[in-house]
């Protein structure tokens, strides 16, 4: 179905028009936008040299820059230690106060989300492809490269091409055991990994309005796997209630026009939809979980973590299923909260104890096994059930390893049974 033929603006166009200080923008146009927030993690170490090569000495606004160490925490290689040192030195030299170092760390996107660094109407950029996640705030949030970031740090501005928008309209309601992860996997199966390249994906409809902020983070996060420039949900009362106690700067809430022009409209009906799973070797190789479960695929490792699905709600749900069960013999179960704050909450609620008593290992917060960096690398031909976002060859270690992407609660069921299973059997 093609989009509306109106002359109104989509949410992405509204935010870019605001950032550029103009009334309207059109897809394909190049605009120069004022950046509201810049975020760097370890890859940000590669911005330091170009920043100095440009002749820059000061960061445009130290209060609008956040650095979060998250990939190798604590440093697990000499190379990682060097990256950390470069960032610490740069932050000290340029007086950047918002540095989330080891001990108060977390996955960068979660740090931004739980500390209110991105608010409605913002143009936010980060040195990580999953920066899309923050579009759940009604912001345009996107990943950029190190040299682009160097320019942003110096000038506070960035050239961007205005993306066309795909609208995803979601109605119906999620059945028992069906989650936001299943919804975004379903959308990925439809749009594919290259179907939204340099486009905005705008989620709307009654089912989206009913989602919590953590659920919205999950769906916006995985627009990255569709090739999207950004994934967005228009701000509403849920957004404002979430941000009210934590917002770091003024909000500029924007909504798409009723007559906005969309490149394509995708309708998704949740009624009767089963849980989904992305099978090797692509996030868009999506099948209904009950069908895959019938194949009795044995797992060697289970990972409950990542910026997609390791918030307190995910871990609570997983721990509730884990109670009274044990991790199956021969299975390694790694649980990694998305931030130190979530770790602390797990400690208070007895969630860590629930997992470790069942035979899981509960790690400090980091990107961890998700990117094959540390704490859970897969050997050739091993199989992993994961709540993360990517299952391309080599993503979590050996390129021959096979990764199945699913919801947090489905990963727990896989850990208990030792194979990919429809978790609704255990609920």
Image (spheres, grey):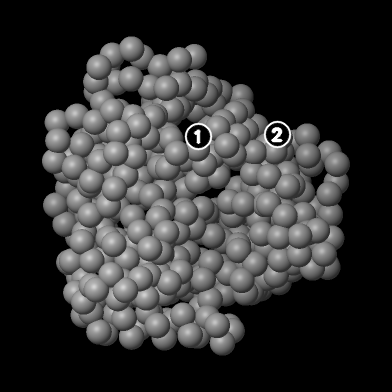
The answer to whether residue 175 is left or right of residue 108 is right
| Residues marked 1 and 2 touching at CB (< 8 Å) | no
The answer to whether residue 232 is left or right of residue 382 is left
The answer to whether residue 291 is left or right of residue 388 is right
User: Percent position (x, y) of residue 70?
Assistant: 47, 71
Q: Which of 41/53 is in front? A: 53
Tell me, yes or no, if residue 421 can be seen here. Answer: yes
User: Percent position (x, y) of residue 391?
Assistant: 67, 52
Q: Is residue 224 above or below residue 337?
A: above
Q: Earlier in the sequence, mark 1 or mark 2?
A: 1
Tell me the element at label 2: strand
Q: Nearest to the eye among marks 1 and 2: give it.
A: 1
Q: Is residue 99 above or below residue 162?
A: below
Tell me, yes or no, if residue 208 can be seen here. Answer: no
Seen at 25% across and 41% down, the residue is: 31
Q: Which of 222/95 is in front? A: 95
User: Percent position (x, y) of residue 292?
Assistant: 78, 39
Q: Residues within 10 Å of mark 1 (few under 14, many from 20)?
A: many
Q: CA distance from mark 1 to mark 2?
A: 22 Å
Badge number at residue 196: 1
Seen at 79% across and 68% down, the residue is: 379
The answer to whether residue 106 is left or right of residue 253 is right
Residue holding disc 2: 288
Seen at 40% across and 17% down, the residue is: 3
Circle count: 2
Q: Is residue 95 above or below residue 61?
A: below
């Amino acid at each position: 179905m093609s989009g509306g033929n109106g002359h109104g603006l989509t949410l992405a166009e509204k935010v870019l028009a605001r950032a550029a200080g103009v009334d309207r923008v059109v897809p394909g146009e190049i605009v120069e936008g004022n950046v509201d927030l810049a975020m760097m993690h370890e890859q940000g170490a590669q911005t330091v040299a170009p920043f100095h090569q440009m002749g820059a000495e000061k960061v445009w606004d130290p209060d609008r820059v956040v650095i979060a160490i998250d990939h190798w925490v604590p440093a697990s290689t000499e190379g990682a230690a060097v990256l950390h040192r470069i960032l610490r030195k740069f932050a000290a030299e340029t007086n950047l106060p918002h540095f989330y170092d080891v001990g108060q760390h977390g996955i960068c996107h979660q740090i931004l989300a739980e500390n209110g660094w991105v608010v409605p109407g913002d143009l936010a950029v980060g040195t990580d492809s999953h920066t899309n996640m923050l579009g759940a705030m009604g912001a345009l949030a996107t990943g950029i490269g190190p040299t682009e970031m160097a320019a942003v740090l110096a000038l506070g501005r960035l050239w961007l091409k205005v993306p066309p928008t795909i609208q995803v309209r979601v109605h119906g309601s999620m059945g028992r055991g069906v989650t936001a992860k299943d919804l975004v996997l379903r959308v990925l199966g439809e749009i594919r990994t290259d179907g939204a390249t340099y486009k905005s994906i705008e989620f709307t409809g009654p089912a989206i309005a009913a989602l919590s902020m953590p659920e919205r983070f999950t769906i916006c996060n995985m627009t990255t796997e569709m090739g999207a420039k950004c994934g967005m949900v228009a701000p509403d009362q849920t957004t404002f209630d979430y941000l009210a106690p934590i917002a770091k700067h003024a909000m500029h809430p924007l909504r798409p026009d009723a007559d906005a022009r969309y490149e394509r409209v995708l309708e998704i009906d949740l009624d009767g939809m089963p849980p989904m799973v992305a099978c090797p070797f692509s996030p868009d190789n999506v099948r209904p979980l009950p069908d895959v479960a019938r194949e009795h695929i044995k797992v060697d490792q289970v990972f409950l973590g990542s910026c997609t699905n390791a918030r307190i709600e995910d871990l609570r749900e997983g721990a509730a299923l884990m109670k009274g069960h044990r991790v199956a013999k021969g299975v390694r179960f790694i649980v990694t909260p998305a931030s130190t704050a979530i770790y602390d909450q797990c400690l208070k609620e007895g969630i860590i104890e629930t997992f470790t008593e069942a035979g899981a290992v509960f790690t400090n917060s980091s990107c961890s096994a998700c990117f094959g960096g540390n704490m859970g690398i897969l050997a050739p031909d091993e199989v992993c059930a994961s709540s993360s976002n990517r299952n391309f060859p080599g993503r979590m270690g050996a390129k021959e390893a096979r990764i199945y992407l699913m919801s947090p609660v489905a990963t727990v069921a896989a850990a208990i049974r030792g194979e990919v299973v429809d978790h609704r059997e255990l609920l």
